[in-house]
Image: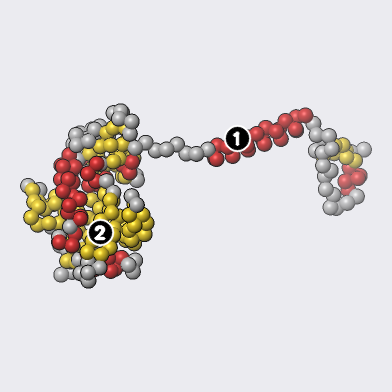
Amino acid sequence: MLTNVVLGRVVNAGQMSQSKNHTPARIENPSPEWTLVRRQSFSASQSRSSMLSRPKMEKRSYTLTPLGQVFLDDGKLNIESTIDATMVSVPHLCPHVEEFGLNNSESVKCLIRYSSHCWTYSVELAQSIPRFIFLDGTRQRVFDPIRYGASHYLRELICSLPQNRIYVTQSDRNYGCYNATVTSDEGCYTAYFTLRPRKGRFDGVRHKFLLTVESAYSKPQQEPGMKTSLSAIIGKARENKTVKYRKP
């Protein structure tokens, strides 16, 4: 007589054919080997769960010096060659909340953040092998002492936006701002920024907008642009829009 082995239990072939909806019997006395496999699988599952539940390691924070040196938060000199630019603190470019007065006597508070592009340039322009690579997402950047030095004026330039010249760039990606009285051998020092609604609190101060300085550097000649104002920019931002470029 033919027999079949179903999950460790001997079953008569004739008995299996008696019912089309035959369901294999459960293991009444599982073998030690099968029990061991179950325990190993359960242990592996527990291990994966415990790994997923572990808190992620905190990212390191760094401080940048005028000479391009990078120190860890414990004061030790950094020796890593690749650094997350978002974790680098530049003392004179720390985030802050600024209150701007508008044309209609209204005032608004903006949280201002400065991108690493204010003190770095693309690695593709490097003349020699850089000591550090600063990662802005997937983009590789290197320390630029010229941009770093000029950035000491950046906070004052941004905080006086209502008094400075603002224009819409042709790309419509951001706004350009400069003060024609601040020039160097390279040209006018220009900041490029975006502004969007972002309610929150920073250092105990409430704000309604986020202004991000995407980049800042000196240019030999200002690119063509349409003049605008901070009041117009904030008015459009309230509608989740931007001031569109129109050819002068």
Name the quarter where the N terminus is drawn. top right
Local crowd size for mark 1, using a 10 Å CA cut-off: few (<14), some (14–19), many (≥20):
few
Q: Look at label 2 and name its amino acid.
A: Glu
Alpha carbons under labels 1 and 2: distance apart: 51 Å
Q: Residue 74's quadrant in the figure?
A: top left
| Residue 120 on image: x %, y % | 23, 43
Residue at left offset 25%, top offset 64%: 107
**Residue 47, disc:** 1
| Residue 30 on image: x %, y % | 80, 34
| Residue 25 on image: x %, y % | 84, 43
Q: Nearer the viewer, residue 62 or 102?
A: 102
Residue at left offset 75%, top offset 32%: 35
Name the quarter where the C terminus is drawn. bottom left
Element at badge 1? Answer: helix
What residue is pinned by disc 2? 99
Residue 192 in sight here:
yes
